[in-house]
Amino acid sequence: METNLKTSPTMQAVDAQELQRRTIRRSDYVSCNQAFIDCRTPGSDTKENYSIIGPGVTQNAQQVVNLREPHGFNIGAAAMPHGVVNNLHLHFTAEVFLNWSGTWRMRWGADGTDGEFVCEEGDIVSVPTWIFRGFTNIGGSHGWLFTALGFDNTGGIIWGPSVLREAEKHGLYLTLENQLIDTVAGDRLPDNVEVVPPLPQSEIDRLRKWSAEQMEERVVRQRDLTWSSNPFLSSELPGGGAELATVIGYGMTEDRDQVPPIHYPHNFNIAWLRAVADEGMLQHRHDHSQVLMGYRGTWLVTLNEGDEKVATVLNPYDSISIPAGAWRTFTALDDEAQMLVVNSGDGRVRLEWPAETRRHAEDKGYATDAAGYAAAWNVVRYSTIDD
């Protein structure tokens, strides 16, 4: 796909048109009510599926995908009225629920009886791979769950046996090529095409069992977040006062004492960033794909350097994709601004700061050590390099 990126060996500038393409407003999200094979199952027929960054696991070729460019992960959403059910299914790569609004009952197991818990607004849930999971909106109003899925190709999903049997009653079949066949709408089931059968009981019996206590360890609740007030080299500089709470993976923290509550591989990392008005993250860059997701308040997101700077505002529910290598600055526009930051990869995200920022940090007594963590300048400056 042709883009408007200007590249050089040392930097990548994003022009205004490209920033607009990468800024996905909530009003730009397009739901598909027939994304999956359970779209006619009573109690599940009014759920909305969104594919925002990458196609995710949709089974409908007509699903609108806002930004198809590979990021190493997918971002989507499920929005559902009160009482609506998302039926049991299995993922091969990481699935993380990001609860923007509503109260949800999560359940797991091939028949949904292995356990359940309640997910509240602001919670983040990392569901184990290779287990059946489903959820129901129990919050009394329309709810919204963003989802982050591992890798560009997720491998699709496996539906619970009862889901496939119920769908067949409503004329819906799924082929091995992940094509949804709707015979009620006039589709014909091709003669030499194999449809997905229910997973054999012998394979279901081999799946790992997860206890309620084990699943609760994979829930990071908003009220339990641990915030670092000095997560970056620039934290003590004017305008650099953002706080960071790691959720999945070490990500881009430069606080060597910050440990994420979830640290096993997802092929992406997730952290909350918050700040009061006029504070945030000073100009920096790194070599990972990045998506910003507005949660509370508003942020000014500025890309590039000098005369090439372009900017846009991140509102709640908006998403912005920032390409690897681009300079970026995040500034809160009000006192309770909070956003989610998703970066590609399982390792740490090593930040690069402009020379001017490094000099100002040294004046404040800070530098980064060889591991990329913020440290006392009067210690680091006297270190020696081993031969």
Image (cartoon, grey):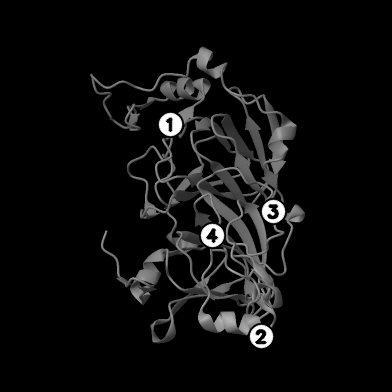
Give the residue at mark 4: 349
Dividing the picture into quadrants, the one containing residue 154 is top left
Q: Is mark 1 on a helix, strand or loop?
A: loop
Query: Disc 1 and disc 2: Cα gap in Å?
Result: 60 Å
- Mark closer to the chain start, 1 or 2: 1
Q: Where is residue 94 in the image (x, y as percent from the top left)?
A: 53, 41
Give the residue at mark 3: 259
At x 45%, y 49%, the residue is: 74
- Mark closer to the chain start, 2 or 4: 4
Q: What element carries label 4?
A: loop
- Mark closer to the chain start, 1 or 3: 1
Q: Nearer the viewer, residue 381 or 128?
A: 381
Image mark for residue 37: 1
Give the residue at mark 2: 363
Q: Is mark 3 on a helix, strand or loop?
A: loop
Q: What amino acid is at disc 3?
A: Val
Query: Disc 3 and disc 2: Cα gap in Å?
Result: 28 Å
Quadrant where the C terminus is found in the figure: bottom right
143 is higher (above) or lower (below) than 322: above
